[in-house]
Image (tube, rainbow, N blue to C red):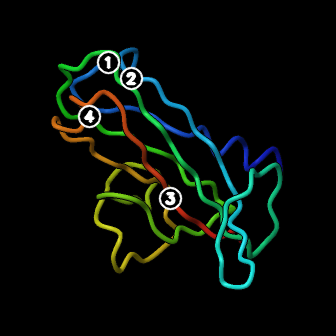
């Protein structure tokens, strides 16, 4: 799909009491393959409608004394959100407001994870979401 869905729609933003310079992100996008009931992930350079993609975001904190922070990711219009790791909130209004992912009407435009202070103190972690290509 067009330039890997515009590089996954400018993947992430930070919110919270830490500066973005103290957090680094690395992301990878995979296509889920199913062969005889076994699931695997393959590196993605293009997508086809109906395929399931998995995006993995790894974060690293430069300081172990961080408080909680949030990571927000725009969900490209060409994807339908299926599920995410951890406690994720979703937005259907371009990231203006967020709520739990259950019983959401409308197209999900953004995902937001809150990294609690205990997880932030570990200095690194991983988030992921699964979506279907429209």
Confirm or deny contact between disc 2 and disc 4 (CB under 8 A): yes
Q: CA separation, marks 2 and 4?
A: 10 Å
- Labels 3, 1: front one: 3
Q: Quick one: label 2 or label 4, which is nearer the N terminus?
A: 2
**Is residue 3 shown left or right of residue 107?**
right
Q: Earlier in the sequence, mark 2 or mark 3?
A: 2
Whether the residues at callouts 2 and 1 have beta carbons within 8 Å, the answer is: yes
Disc 1: CA contacts within 10 A as few (<14), some (14-19) or many (>=20): few
- Is label 3 in a helix, a strand or a loop? strand
Q: Which mark is residue 23?
A: 2
Tell me which residue sits at (68%, 54%) in the image.
30
Q: Residues within 10 Å of mark 2 (few under 14, many from 20)?
A: some
Distance CA(mark 3)–CA(mark 4): 18 Å
Q: In whole angstroms, how far apart are the C-alphas of marks 4 and 1?
A: 9 Å
Residue placed at 37% from the left, 49% from the top?
Answer: 112
Residue located beneath label 1 in the image? 19
- Return the residue at label 4: 69
Mark 4 is surrounded, within 10 Å at the Cα level, by few (under 14), some (14 to 19) or many (20 or more) other residues, namely: many
Say whether disc 3 or disc 4 marks the residue closer to the N-terminus: 4
Q: Report x, y in % for residue 60.
A: 40, 27
Give yes or no for contact between labels 2 and 3 (Cβ–Cβ under 8 Å). no
Residue depth check, mark 2 versus mark 1: number of the one nearer the observer: 2
The tag earlier along the polypeptide, 3 or 1, is 1
Which residue is painted at 39% across and 23% down in the image? 23
Element at label 1: loop
Q: Which mark is residue 129?
A: 3
Q: How many marks?
A: 4
Task: Name the one closer to the observer, 39 or 23.
Answer: 39
């Amino acid at each position: 799909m067009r330039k890997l869905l515009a590089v996954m729609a400018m993947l992430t933003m930070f919110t919270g009491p830490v500066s973005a310079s103290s957090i680094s992100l690395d992301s990878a996008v995979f296509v889920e393959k199913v062969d005889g009931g076994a699931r695997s992930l393959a590196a993605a350079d293009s997508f086809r409608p109906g395929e399931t993609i998995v995006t993995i975001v790894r974060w690293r904190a430069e300081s172990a004394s961080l408080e909680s922070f949030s990571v927000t990711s725009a969900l490209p219009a060409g994807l339908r959100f299926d599920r995410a790791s951890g406690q994720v909130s979703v937005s259907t209004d371009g990231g203006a407001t967020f709520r739990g992912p259950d019983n959401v009407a409308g197209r999900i435009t953004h995902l937001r994870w809150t990294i609690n202070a205990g997880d932030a103190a570990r200095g690194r972690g991983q988030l992921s979401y699964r979506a279907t290509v429209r």
